[in-house]
Amino acid sequence: MPANLPPAYFAAEKEYKNARTIPEKIATLEEMLAAMPHHKGTDKLRAGLNRKIAQLKLHAESSTKTKRGSLFSIEKQGAAQVMLVGMPNTGKSSILAALTHATPDIADYSYTTTLPEVGMMPYEDIQVQVVDLPPIHEDIRKLPFYNLLRNADLLMVVLDGSGDPALEITLLLDELGEGKVFSAFFDGDVPAGAVRKRMMLVINKCDGGEGEDLVGGVEAATGGKIGIIAVSTASGVGMDDLRERIFREVEITRVYTKMPGKKPDMKAPYVLPAGSTVMDLAREIHRDFSENLRFARVWGSSRFDGQSVHLDHVLLDGDIVELHM
Ligand SMILES: Nc1nc2c(ncn2[C@@H]2O[C@H](COP(=O)(O)OP(=O)(O)OP(=O)(O)O)[C@@H](O)[C@H]2O)c(=O)[nH]1
Ligand SMILES: [Mg+2]
C-alpha cells in the first residue's frame, strides 16, 4: 500500500537531512511523524522513525559526557567527512580551528592533540565535517582511533612547510601503508584488508612565498597524482583555496529540486556522490518517488533549460531538477 505522503513530510525530511545536531535531528524526525497520515500504508515508516528517534535520544544521553566523539567511530554529519592526518606539530589543529568554529588545543610542542575533535566547515550552502586527530607516530596503529581513518571520505594530510615536507610525506605514506591505509592512486598491490583512500596534501606553515618550491618537491616525492596545496594558518595564505579544494576533492554534487510551476528551493540542496543520476536523486528523496518516476526536467547539465531527460541522466553540481511521476 503506497504511503501517499504529503509535501509537509518531505519538507521535514529535507530539514532532517540538513540537521547537524542531535536535538535538531530529533525535532525534524518528530515533525516528519506529525506530518505522516495515519493508515496501514505508513505503519512501517512510522515504526522506523520512532526507532530512529529512540536511538538518537540514547546517543544524546551517552555523548553529553564528551563533545569530542567516540574513539572508535565518529558519526558522519554534513556533506562529507574529512580527516586531518599528519606528523606531530604540523598544524592539524590550527587548520581545524581556521576552517571551523571548533576550538582545539594548539601548542608549540608535539602530541598536543590526544583525542579526535570535530568541527563543521561551512562551504557555500553546505557543511563539511572536519575531524582533527592525534598525530601519526610509530605506535599509532595500536591506538583505537586509527580505524577512524578507514571510514573517512577524504584524508587531508598535513605537512610541515618549515621542515622537509617531501621527506615527511614519504615517511608518512610508509607508516600509513604499514597500517593498511593507501592512497586511492597507489598503483602497487595492497595487502588483504587494506583500504585505498582519497587523499589531499596540505603543506602548512608556508607563511611567505616558499610554497611553490615545496609543492614541487612533494609532487616529485608522490608521483604527481595526489593534489597538493600550500597554506599558512598564521598568515592566511591559501586558506580560501583550501576550502574550495576540499569541496572539489570530496566529489559531491549538489542538486536543487522544484515542483512543476513553482520556483526551485535553492536553500537546501540534496547532496549526492559525483556521477549520480536522476534515479539516484529520486531514491535519495524517497523510495515512492523512485518507483513511480517517469522522467525529469533539468536546468543546468541538460542541453537546454527545462529539458526532459531520462532517469539515467548524470546530474552536475548546481543542477535544478523537476521530478515527474
Ligand atoms: N609559522 C607557522 N606556525 C604555525 C602555523 N600553523 C600552526 N603553527 C604553529 O605550529 C604549532 C603546532 O600547531 P598545532 O595546530 O597544535 O599542530 P598539530 O599538528 O595539531 O600538533 P599535534 O596535535 O601535536 O599533532 C603551534 O605552535 C602553531 O602556532 C603556520 O601557518 N605558520
Ligand atoms: Mg593537534
Image: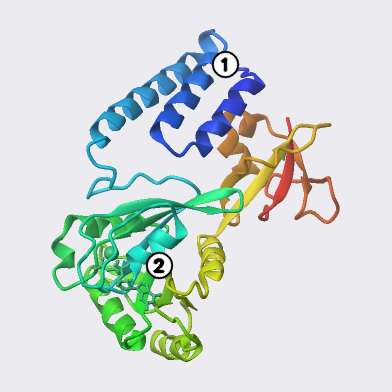
Above or below, 138 against 287 in this view is below
**Residue 236 place in picture, x, y as percent:** 49, 71
* Mark 1 nearby-residue class (10 Å; few <14, some 14–19, many ≥20): some
Which numbered disc, 1 or 2, marks the residue that appears first in the sequence? 1
Q: Which numbered marker is on residue 35?
A: 1
Q: Which numbered marker is on residue 156?
A: 2
The answer to whether the residues at label 1 and label 2 have Cβ atoms under 8 Å apart is: no
Placement of the N terminus among the 4 image quadrants: top right
Q: Which numbered marker is on residue 120?
A: none
Q: Amino acid at mark 2?
A: Met
Q: Say which element carries label 2.
A: strand
The quarter of the displayed image where residue 200 is located: bottom left
Above or below, 21 against 153 in this view is above
Q: Quadrant of ligand 2?
A: bottom left
Placement of the C terminus among the 4 image quadrants: top right
**Residue 181 place in picture, x, y as percent:** 30, 67
Above or below, 233 against 116 in this view is below
Q: How is the image coloured?
A: rainbow
Residue at image point 36% right, 56% down: 131
Q: Is mark 1 within 8 Å of ligand 2?
A: no
Residue at image point 31% right, 58% down: 150
Foreground pick, 89 / 55: 89
* Mark 2 nearby-residue class (10 Å; few <14, some 14–19, many ≥20): many
Q: Is residue 188 left or right of residue 211?
A: left
Return the residue found at the far right. Answer: 304
Q: Amino acid at mark 1?
A: Ala
The quarter of the displayed image where residue 47 is located: top left
**Residue 33 place in picture, x, y as percent:** 50, 17
Above or below, 212 against 296 in this view is below
**Residue 147 place in picture, x, y as percent:** 25, 57
For the question of whether residue 154 can be seen, the reply is: no
